Amino acid sequence: MERLKKLVFQVFASLVSILVTFIVLEIAAQVALNCFAGERTFRKYASLRQLQKRYAQVGQCWSPHRYLGHYATPYYQKGLNRHNSLGYRGDEIQMPKPAGRQRIVCTGGSTTYTTEVEDYHLSYPALLEQELRSRGYDVDVVNDGVGSWTSWESLVSFEFRTQYLEPDIIILYHGVNDVLQRMVWPPEAYRGDNSGTHTPILMPMPSILEYSTLMRYFMIRAGVIKSHSSMDRHVTAPAKTFYLDEFVRQKRAGTYPEGFFREVSARKMFETNKPVYFRRNIENNIELAKSRNVKTVLATFAYSSDFPYFPTASSEEFISAHAEMNETLKEIARQTGASLFDFALVFPKDKCYFTDGIHVNAEGSALKAKLFADYLIETGLVKK
């Protein structure tokens, strides 16, 4: 009996010790996250409640939209970044457009928004406006880029938003997000509305473990859950037929192909799921713009393959898919007469211009703006 009591006491003492240790670590994790973590780290590991307390609304930068899924939150301002009252990154847009002024709308995903550059003045569309004005052109440039947007959202955005800005030129810059939409299986899950990759969320409900900052940190690091600030938690969630996350995980772990990919490789997905919807969306956007006397500039997608930890830029499968998408843009331009800027050909692939092989840094953003300005002037698309 004495031995049993001693054993019970030891087990109890061990459990109490573990609990106390966990509580101490939990408190330390919360203090570190709330008081010492940078903004990017905080957004990645904070809970829904912590995000709401600091930013007043979940996802802060993006808001749900009835037709677009999500868009840039109007009036959002944090640090050096801001959105105007219409939900575009940058300063207020003068409406109606001043007589004699040319207006350019840059539309696309995070590479147009210029996500990795915190100061909105240093985003590529803002710098493009500065570049053109410094050369004597009366223009303004609107940043209609939103993280995760594909050519589908740009098409819808033109119909419901962009055309009412009275643009003279739209620049369509798409690539990686449209490539991602093709990583679905079986083939019938590949649809023009992208429902094969993401499904609507009815009620985001975190598990009980996610209320712990410590547990949430390790679960996000391990890839078990998405960050609470991720759009996958509030707007849409990955569909079961979408295999991007598993592909990235295996590539980073060096285990590809395993599991499902032994039967259906990523290359087979791309070979089966041709960019037919990408082509349709771009062509329809060109026709809509033409009907409103708006010129369209298509730009090929630039990236750097010198980032092995980011398979969407460095893997052989994605390199081939990017090339196919860029060739599709060239074909569309030949068939429709739309202007084509072969940006991927002239933009350096040097690692120093990128943060992850897909998104440019501040230096890359400045060079991107200059090259686009050169193209618009050399082709006579903008006039003094």
Image: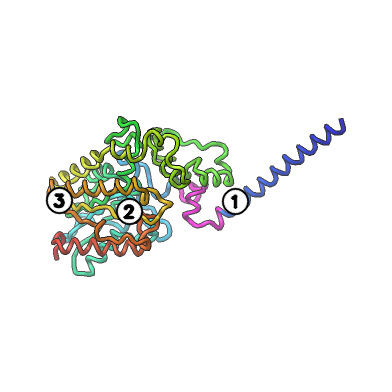
- Secondary structure of the magenta portion, mostly? helix
Tell me the SS state at disc 3: loop
* Residue receiving disc 2: 111
Q: Are marks 3 and 1 in contact (CB under 8 Å)?
A: no
Q: Is residue 41 magenta?
A: yes
Q: Which residue is depicted at the point 55% across and 41% down?
A: 210
Identity, as a three-letter code, of the amino acid under mark 2? Thr
Tell me the SS state at disc 2: helix
User: At which x and y percent is residue 243?
Assistant: 39, 38
* Residue receiving disc 1: 29
**Residue 359 vertical position relative to residue 335 in the rendered view, above or below:** below
Q: Are marks 3 and 2 in contact (CB under 8 Å)?
A: no
Quarter holding the C terminus?
bottom left
> Within 10 Å of the Cα at label 1, are there few (<14), some (14-19), or many (20+) other Cα atoms?
some
**Mark 3 to mark 2 CA distance (whole Å):** 21 Å
Tell me the SS state at disc 1: helix
User: At which x and y percent is residue 160?
Assistant: 24, 43
**Mark 2 to mark 1 CA distance (whole Å):** 33 Å
Q: Which residue is depicted at the point 49% across and 43% down?
A: 223
Q: Which residues are magenta?
A: 33-56
Identity, as a three-letter code, of the amino acid under mark 1? Ala
For the question of whether residue 221 can be seen, the reply is: yes
Q: Is residue 178 magenta?
A: no
Mark number, residue 338: 3
Colour basis: rainbow
Of residues 165 and 300, which is closer to you in this image? 300
> Within 10 Å of the Cα at label 2, are there few (<14), some (14-19), or many (20+) other Cα atoms?
many
> Within 10 Å of the Cα at label 3, are there few (<14), some (14-19), or many (20+) other Cα atoms?
some
Quarter holding the N terminus?
top right
User: For the residues carrying marks 2 and 1, which lies nearer the camera in this image?
Assistant: 2
